[in-house]
Image (cartoon, rainbow, N blue to C red):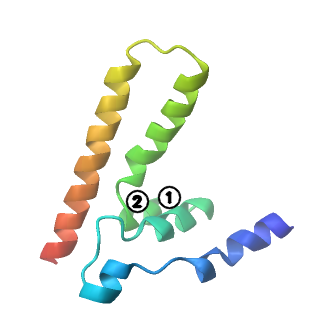
C-alpha cells in the first residue's frame, strides 16, 4: 500500500528545471520526470509525447543491465545504435521545443 501511495504523490516531489526558471527556456531534459511518472502510471502514449527519448532510453538501460549478466553478441553495435538514437531524439525534441 505504501508503494502505491508513493507513486500517487510522486508529482508533488519533482525537481524544478533551473534552466526554465532562470532563462525561460526548456533544457534538453525537460519533461523526463513527468514522462517517468506517466510510465509508472501506465500511460505510455502520454509518456512518449512528453519525452520521446524514453522510447529508446528504456531499451538501452534494459540492454545494458542484461549485457552485464549475459554475453550478448554484437553488444557494442546495439548499444551504440540505441545511444545514438537516444541522443538524436533528445536533440530533435529540444529543437522542436525551441522552434515552437
| Vertical comparison of 20 with 62: above or below | below
Can residue 24 be seen here? The reply is: no
Residue 48 is labelled as 2
| Circle 2 SS class | helix
Q: Out of 22 and 92, give the one closest to the viewer.
A: 22
Quarter of the rendering containing residue 92: bottom left
Residue 90 located left or right of residue 74:
left
Which x, y percent locates residue 46? Answer: 45, 66
Quadrant (top left/top right/bottom left/bottom right) for the N terminus: bottom right
Q: Out of 95 and 55, give the one closest to the viewer.
A: 95
| Circle 1 SS class | helix
- Contact flag, marks 1 and 2 (Cβ < 8 Å): yes
Residue 8 located left or right of residue 71:
right
Local crowd size for mark 1, using a 10 Å CA cut-off: few (<14), some (14–19), many (≥20): some
Residue at x 32%, y 39% (from the top left corner)? 83
Residue 70 located left or right of residue 5:
left
Q: CA distance from mark 1 to mark 2?
A: 6 Å
Quarter of the rendering containing residue 42: bottom right
Residue 89 is labelled as none
| Vertical comparison of 21 with 73: above or below | below
Which x, y percent locates residue 74? Answer: 37, 15
Local crowd size for mark 2, using a 10 Å CA cut-off: few (<14), some (14–19), many (≥20): some
Can residue 80 be seen here? The reply is: yes
Where is mark 1, residue-wise? Answer: 44
Which x, y percent locates residue 69? Answer: 61, 22
Residue at x 34%, y 36% (from the top left corner)? 82
User: How many marks are shown on the rendered structure?
Assistant: 2
Residue at x 24%, y 86% (from the top left corner)? 23
Amino acid at each position: 500500500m505504501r508503494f502505491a501511495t508513493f507513486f500517487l504523490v510522486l508529482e508533488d516531489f519533482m525537481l524544478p528545471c533551473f534552466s526554465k526558471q532562470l532563462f525561460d527556456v526548456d533544457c534538453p531534459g525537460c519533461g523526463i520526470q513527468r514522462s517517468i511518472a506517466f510510465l509508472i502510471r501506465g500511460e505510455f502514449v502520454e509518456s512518449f509525447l512528453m519525452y520521446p527519448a524514453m522510447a529508446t532510453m528504456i531499451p538501452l538501460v534494459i540492454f545494458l543491465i542484461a549485457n552485464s549478466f549475459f554475453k550478448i553478441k554484437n553488444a557494442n553495435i546495439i548499444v551504440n545504435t540505441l545511444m545514438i538514437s537516444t541522443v538524436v531524439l533528445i536533440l530533435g525534441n529540444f529543437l522542436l521545443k525551441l522552434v515552437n
